[in-house]
Image (cartoon, coloured by chain):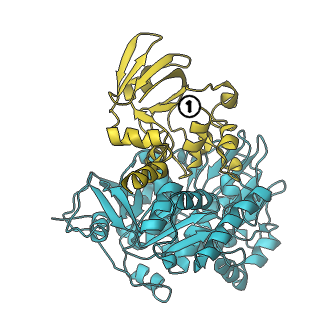
Chain colours: A cyan, B yellow
Amino acid sequence: MAMTITEKILAAHSRLKRVEPGELIEVDVDFCLANDITAPIAIERFRQAGAKKIYDAARVALVPDHFVPNKDIESAAQCQILREFAQEHKLPHFFEVGRMGIEHALLPEQGLVLPGDVVVGADSHTCTYGGLGAFATGVGSTDLAAVMITGRTWFRVPASIKFVYHGTLAPWVTGKDLILYTIGQVGVDGARYRSMEFTGQVISHLSMDQRLTMANMAIEAGAKNGIIAPDECTRAFVEGRAQRSYTFYESDDNAVYEQVINYDVSEIEPQVALPHSPANSQPVSSLDKISIDQVVIGSCTNGRLEDLRAAADILKNRRIAPGVRCLIIPATQTIYRQAMDEGLFTIFLEAEAAISTPTCGPCLGGHMGILAAGERAVATTNRNFVGRMGHPESEVYLASPAVAAASAVLGRIASPEEL
Amino acid sequence: MKFSGKAWKFGADIDTDAIIPARYLNTSNPQELALHCMEDADPEFPQKVTPGDVIVADKNFGCGSSREHAPIAIKAAGVSCVIAASFARIFYRNSFNMGLPILESPEAAADVVTGEQLEIDLSTGTIVNKSRNLTYKAQPVPVFMQELLAAGGLIPYVMKHLSSSE
């Protein structure tokens, strides 16, 4: 019986020969995680259930990343709950400020989540690790607590939708543009409860950073997971970092898909998702001159080294437009260091951009770049819902790092072509 | 399980940031969260909602983040049940885990308007619109899921089972 990559991973983790869409299964979890917003509730449930021990302390990561460095007294108290729990249970993967990163950039970088894994996280963007060829999905805090206790969870096997990307990418078109385009085509519930499998020549040639960006936003189409079959690019990325053994799975040629959707990427130009939905994506050239107040380059979607390099290519020997604030947030300490060593910080500082320590911060309207009523931002983040970056009357436009940087220079939403 | 209350109608794709904005997530205290429930979709909702009221929404209710604070805020605001044409998957699972009753009914979602009086029976999956004397169908909630809801969510439900088997 032929299976998709998602079905194979789920079958292997439920000790079954095969699984089919719709089937309810119990699976072994390779790794689980929570952050400073979701872990406090998970820890409360863990204690409430009377649990004393974590199933395997080495398979749990607690990453304070949303409201850190602590933005206020309440946030400090939330982080304290994580810190104390990590000490109590001797968690080797508690990442303190100064050693941390945004969870979905940090865990792949540290080799803690790997190809073939089942990963559950109390954060919806846990689906990011599908870029490595893992089955990874977001759950709530209570489900996460149960995983911390038992090492297992239940799933309904999702049907898969195969997305095939053909053709040649136009200049400035990245994984971010492909995923914004895709969500624009299928809608914010177009893959609800489904697995999105990203395939085709174009995907094979995408870097790991861009694959992680695409898988990251599968949730914005309502998907349970997004996944890309591992290959040599994956091997090159995980070799030397993997902290456990890993397995490469791939879909059988005759695997069954609910739908197969083909895109010729040659026709796609850089995309911008207009407020207030990630599905409102439009070609950047089709937009009027939309003035902006702020640019954010960072997040679990686009805060990796390649993203910072793309921004630096644009900002080199240029200045941020008067009246615009440009915030650059390397996603992890390692990325921060690499960007600094490569001289990217000099470029950013000369362009008059601000560089922040790793944090989810403004992406979810937490801190470090909140918008006032009527303000407008271009962000490389993943959501542009009402009030997402601050005041309910502010606006967020989602785009790639290159488009965000070009917009910062011109003071309005702009294509890099215009520079 | 049966509920009755006044309907509050919302549109499609109500995301978790609309249900409880992230700017309030520096706490997980249910009463604090309830003060901001649905604020970015309807700023007056926390003041207007009364105990037992029902949220009725179009497709994909609860899309976006995995925050359990969303069903917690709705429940703490006094809402007895959420009816939608469809739910986003993480929100769906979180709602049962939190003990917030939810029902999928495209029929009710398409017809009910704010202010109408609803009577809901989870075991039969029927929603009666008392204001217009209409009945809508939904998938019934199985008995064990009703017990889970009655217990107040997954953890209390599991604990109840543990103590009864001891």
Q: Chain of mark 1?
A: B
Number of numbered discs overlaid on the protein picture = 1
Residue A366 image-quadrant placement: bottom right
Secondary structure under the numbered disc 1 in the rendered image: loop
Q: Position of residue A236 (x, y in %)?
A: 45, 85
* Residue at the (23%, 64%) spot, across then down: A3
User: From what the image shows, is residue A147 above or below residue B23?
Assistant: below
Outermost residue on the bottom side: it is A240
Residue A314 visible? The answer is yes
Outermost residue on the left side: it is A1
Name the one closer to the observer, A353 or B22.
Answer: B22
Q: Position of residue A324 (x, y in %)?
A: 80, 55
Residue A197 image-quadrant placement: bottom left
Report which residue position mark 1 lands on: B79
Name the one closer to the observer, A347 or A51.
Answer: A51
* Residue at the (42%, 67%) spot, across then down: A150
Q: Position of residue A391 (x, y in %)?
A: 74, 43
Outermost residue on the top side: it is B132
User: From what the image shows, is residue A330 above or below residue A159?
Assistant: below
Tell me the quarter of the image containing the C terminus of chain A: bottom right
